[in-house]
Image: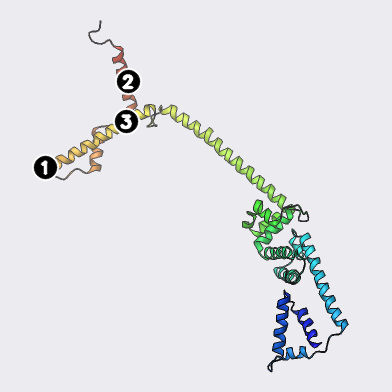
Amino acid sequence: MAERTVIYDIHDFCPPPTATSRVRACYGFFARADRPGATSRAADIVARPAMSTSDLSDVETAREARAESGRAACARVLATQRDYYRVLELPRAASAADVKKAYRNLARVLHPDKCDDPRATDAMAIVTSAHSTLTTPALRAAYDLYAARVDVGDANADSFGEWQSKEGAAAVHLPPWLIKAMATPVLAQLIGFLALVLLLAAAALALALALAYFVVHMAFWFACCFGCCGSCWPRYGMGARVHAKRQARFTEMLKDYERAAMEASARGDEGPAPTVFFAQWNVDHPEPDWVERIREEDRAEAAARASPAYGAT
């Protein structure tokens, strides 16, 4: 009878997962208790008086109560799986230590090795997800924003993971204080209003800059163009022809410098300094008014085309 008492005690405090391991555990326990050097705890347990029928009934009742509490906790967790605070039975202001304590208490009841409900694995996964989310500051702030925007009591609503994959992924990278403010209904509306005002201000500034460019800048551009007749543009119209004349003059100046340097070298003298030579060259060859020079060339060419050819009949 004493052996039966010990078996019930062991099963009560250390329930093994299978019947085979239960038998092996009991066998090992009694094998150690029979040795000369057995611990006093094992000897005391063996020396206990046999349990009465009422004691055995109390043990079975306690075991059934634990099983019933596990099934009830499993049903509650699955029913409130989107509300992590209700899953852990905690207020929203609970600390990380409170979250860990609630997680340990539920794990003792819902662990698949201790709960015979077939849904225990799913319930334990929800409890683990709630624990990991509420103990991480960034994830907890994102979850609070999710709970403020989604009806967590609706069974058809998106889960926290689904919400994160859609619109909550960016919220994880925001500062916690901003996420907390966005989770508050009044502050969320205020932040949205301020964001809209800033967006409109940026759009107005961009429009003003565009108008300033196209109205003011282009007006000055046209005035400048009409004033110089395009001579400031080396790629178009008169400007291109003026630029070609200036390039030809510059090339002629370089050729004169090379010729002077070669002549000095042939005489055995030192070549002229480039800066001095170019300055003197510009004095000796002053730059003409290229626009007027080109117009004279155009008039002469037009007159030559208009005059009859020599000997024409």
User: Which residue is disc 1 drawn over?
Assistant: 267
Residue 61 is tagged as none
Q: Amino acid at mark 1?
A: Arg
Residue bearing mark 2: 298
- Looking at marks 3 and 2 on the same chain, the residue that comes earlier in the sequence is marked by 3
Residues at marks 3 and 1, CA–CA distance in whole angstroms: 35 Å
Question: Viewer-proximal residue, 264 or 87?
Answer: 87
Q: Residue furthest right?
A: 54
Lower position in the chain sequence, tag 3 or tag 1 = 3
**Residue drawn at 70 percent across, 81 percent down:** 24
Kindly state the secondary structure of the residue where label 3 is placed: helix
> Measured along the vertical axis of the image, is residue 112 above or below residue 258?
below
In this figure, which residue is indicated by the disc labeled 3?
Answer: 244
Check the image and report above or below for 97 versus 168: below
The nearer-to-camera label among 3 and 1 is 3
Q: CA distance from mark 3 to mark 2?
A: 15 Å
Quarter of the image where the N terminus is located: bottom right
Q: Amino acid at mark 2?
A: Asp
Q: Disc 1 on helix, strand or loop?
A: helix
Per the model, the C-alpha gap separating discs 2 and 1 is 44 Å
Q: Amino acid at mark 3?
A: Ala
The residue at the point 82 percent across, 69 percent down is: 68
Residue closer to the observer: 284 or 49: 49
Quarter of the rendering occupied by the C terminus: top left
Outermost left residue: 267
Q: Is residue 231 above or below residue 26?
A: above
